[in-house]
Image (cartoon, grey):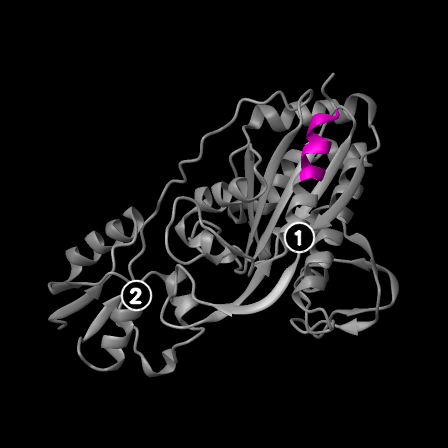
Amino acid sequence: EIKEMGIYEFDDNYKAALEELNKKSNFTEKKYNNYNDAMNNLLNKKIEAVFISSSHKSILEEQVDFDKIKVLDTTEVKIKNEVTIKDVDVTKESFNIYISGIDIYGDISQVSRSDVNMIATINPVTHQVLLTSIPRDYYVRLHNTTGYKDKLTHAGIYGINMSIETLEDLFEIDIDYYVRVNFTTLVNLVDAIEGIDITSDKAFTAYTNHSCTYVKGKNHLDGKCALAFSRERYAYQEGDRHRVQNQQAVITAILNKALSSSTLVKKYSSILESMGSSFQTNMPQDKIYSLVNMQLDSMPKWNITSISVNGKDSYNYTYSYSAGKLYVMEPDMSTVEVAANKIKEIENKWKK
């Protein structure tokens, strides 16, 4: 029986989970202004237990040895993402989609860090797609926060809105829709379109799946090996920077194959169904249907390009973890400016 519980009510989702926990057990709440103080008091045996979110636990694991801590109970609550849906004529106007990838399998409903962050700028008139990638550790100001900046990946802890608004602030653009995916999404999607072809700049065996090997040059990949390729960083001297390139290569290969086959375009409904609960989007069904019909009408060829922002390796305190310095990437704002201008260039080409 726990008599005193350390808590940090950082948002409404946490409060909802805390209410569920209170229904199961009785304890006195000891409130903290941050997780760091709560965890330190737990480790120093000043309190008996703390109630933390799973997403914050993943941040704390970078600094705290959780093997010394026993999980007493878990509580789950379902939340609804409140994201404003933009009214865009997707067959005549350019639009931006935020692609968020989280590093889990299975159901995508849980709150988690966003390890893949990409903006797809789509111009339906000129048939251009620009993929802009932002490294997971990019050190940015989270929307409407004060104090320390944070890793972009941590924005996902506070909901999809936080990630979207933070990127809107960074690039000074509007993001119209989002797509949220995970490991299962990618595996099922690639298998549903019967594999993709990518070009690797070196031969290697995947660190996350040793059954996946790649030759230098063209490779045909099934779902599991497409996932391993998009996760690879240990095979490259540039590490995470090259992983971003691989992620763009996989997305580009999926788009190229899907958009070049009228058979696959017609199967869009069954392809979406194959991803099931591992896929989330706020793009209305009628907008997706309009894009499908536009593609089927003339099967235009699309020009898909990509760009990444860059920065320098550093260590700093973060908004989500202020007890110690974590690895971050300090933005090279000149690359941000170049990417922002490229996005706006693609967006504006349809306008007279």
Quarter holding the N terminus is: bottom left
Which type of secondary structure does the marked residue at label 2 adopt? helix
Specify the principal SS of the magenta part. Answer: helix
Residue 309: mark in rendering: 1
Mark sitting earlier along the chain (1/2): 2
Asked whether, in this view, residue 338 is left or right of residue 46, the answer is right
The answer for how far apart the CA atoms under marks 1 and 2 are is 31 Å
The dot on residue 35 is: 2
Residue shown at the point (66%, 52%) measured from the top left:
309
Please tell me whether residue 66 is drawn above or below residue 38 in the rendered image: below
Which residue sits at x=63%, y=60%?
311
| Outermost residue to the right | 217
Relative to the observer, which residue lies in front, 42 or 299? 42
User: In the rendered view, would you say 172 is above or below 194?
Assistant: above
Residue 306, how many percent across, how many down? 74, 46
Please name the residue shown 79% across and 42% down the image.
256
Q: Amino acid at mark 1?
A: Val
Q: Which residues are magenta?
A: 341-349
**Is residue 194 rendered to the left or right of residue 78?**
right
Residue 224 percent coordinates (x, y): 68, 61
Q: Determine if the magenta segment contains residue 345.
A: yes
Say which of 125 and 297 sits in front: 125
Residue 269 image label: none
Vertical placement of 128 versus 166: above or below?
Answer: above
The residue sitting at 30% across, 65% down in the picture is 35
Front of the two marks 1 and 2: 1
Type of amino acid at the residue the image marks with label 2 = Tyr
Question: Residue 329: percent from the left, percent from the top?
Answer: 58, 63
In the rendered image, residue 82, in percent from the top left (x then y), is placed at: 40, 36
Element type where label 1 sits in the image: loop
Q: Pointer 2: residues within 10 angstroms few (<14), some, or many (20+)?
A: many
User: Is residue 133 something that shows in the picture?
Assistant: no
